[in-house]
Amino acid sequence: MISRTFFSFVLAATVAATALLAPSLPVQAAPAQATADQQATPELEWHDVTTWGVEGRAWGDMPRNRWFQRMPDAAEGKVTQSVWNLSQDSAGMMVRFKTNATAIWVHFNLRSERLALPHMPATGVSGVDLYARDDQGQWRWVNVTKTDKKEMKVAIITELAPGMREYAAYLPLYNGIESLAIGVPPGAKFEKLAPRSDKPIVFYGTSITHGASASRPGMVHTAILGRRFERPVVNLGFSGNGKMDAAVGEFLVKIDAAVYVIDCLPNMNADEVRQKAPALVKQLRAAHPQTPIVLVEDRRNTNSWILPKRAQHHTDNHVALREVYEVLKKQGVSGLYYIAGDGMLGHDTEGTTDGSHPNDLGFMRQADTF
């Protein structure tokens, strides 16, 4: 009878022999991606973006305590404290430049140490997102910073194909910027592109307009539409606080807009819609008789198909806004347009991160609807 010890010896010897005789297989390592700490900063020429300006920064002639805050100092004490606090985020701002550099660096300081949200990654909350025009003049994505600290000095992209091209860098959506500079190797051409003088598309809305929950700043629908229309965009989304406030309207009328897009229903109920929507439209129309105004229904939460109370809330809001729209038209308000909310994020329930806030798929669908 053969012992268990003998079997164990034979098994161990067989395994060892197999390992020695088997050919060596290469181990595929994941591509290394240096963090800001790991990257050695080469010699670079830095360009402070405040010296030529960003798009999405309305009221440029009004004083600001912080250069990158969205609303001017005059808004403090007039808009609600929550709106004022949220206006410190740089959502919607974008800087353009041309360069033939084969590497592009960014050096920026953030206002808040909160780099991410439970339903939104740091790339969207606190990232700088880079696009470039291809040879056909179309905007194409390049890269985004993997932000992991308040101060970032990092190569956003290296080993670029040679050639002079236009770039657009989108600033963080749910964090504020204190400073931002673009770095290129010495000798690289660098052309600062001033903000375009075209009238901007002005969005006034909620956390969705603010950018939740895009994976990166260039993927919120306002930025997508800016690229598609080739036009500057002003993003006045205020998370939880887009409520058609007259105080915000006082500043909206100071912008010579191409179109006003009012998308506040996710933060309102039907009674508030009936009360505030007519007043805001008339406030805008009195100051700008010809500027188009677009009223937007709220998207339906993607899980509202199984939540009757939530579904009814959306229905009530839609009915209220449609009533306001029809009454205003009968009163002779011209240049008024309407976007329905049903199906805005698609019909497969896959367009959000949390039922409410669009993911990138949802934002693409929302941009298509708009």
Image: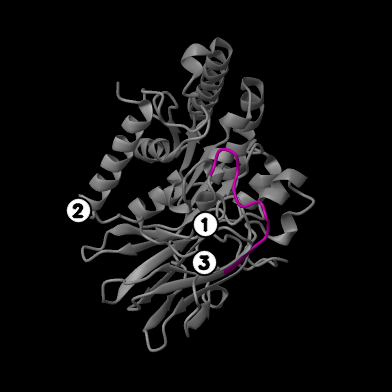
- Position of residue 182 relative to residue 73, above or below, is below
Q: Residue furthest front?
A: 1
Give the class, few, some or many, for how many residues have Cα within 10 Å of label 1's Cα (few <14, many ≥20). many
Instruction: Please identify the dominant SS of the magenta region.
Output: loop
Report the amino acid beneath label 3.
Answer: Val
Q: Residue at x 52, y 66 (%)?
A: 54
Please give the residue where the numbered disc 1 appears in the rendered image.
Answer: 127
CB-based contact (under 8 Å), mark 1 and mark 3: no
Q: State how far apart marks 2 and 1 are (Cα).
A: 45 Å
Q: Position of residue 277 (x, y in %)?
A: 60, 32
Task: Answer with mark 3 or mark 2, whichever residue precedes in sequence.
Answer: 2
Q: State how far apart marks 1 and 3 are (Cα).
A: 16 Å
Quarter of the rendering containing residue 345:
top left
Report the amino acid beneath label 1.
Answer: Gly
Number of labels in the image equals 3
Give the class, few, some or many, for how many residues have Cα within 10 Å of label 3's Cα (few <14, many ≥20). many
Q: Secondary structure at mark 1?
A: loop
Q: Position of residue 139 (x, y in %)?
A: 31, 58
Q: Is residue 304 left or right of residue 270?
A: left
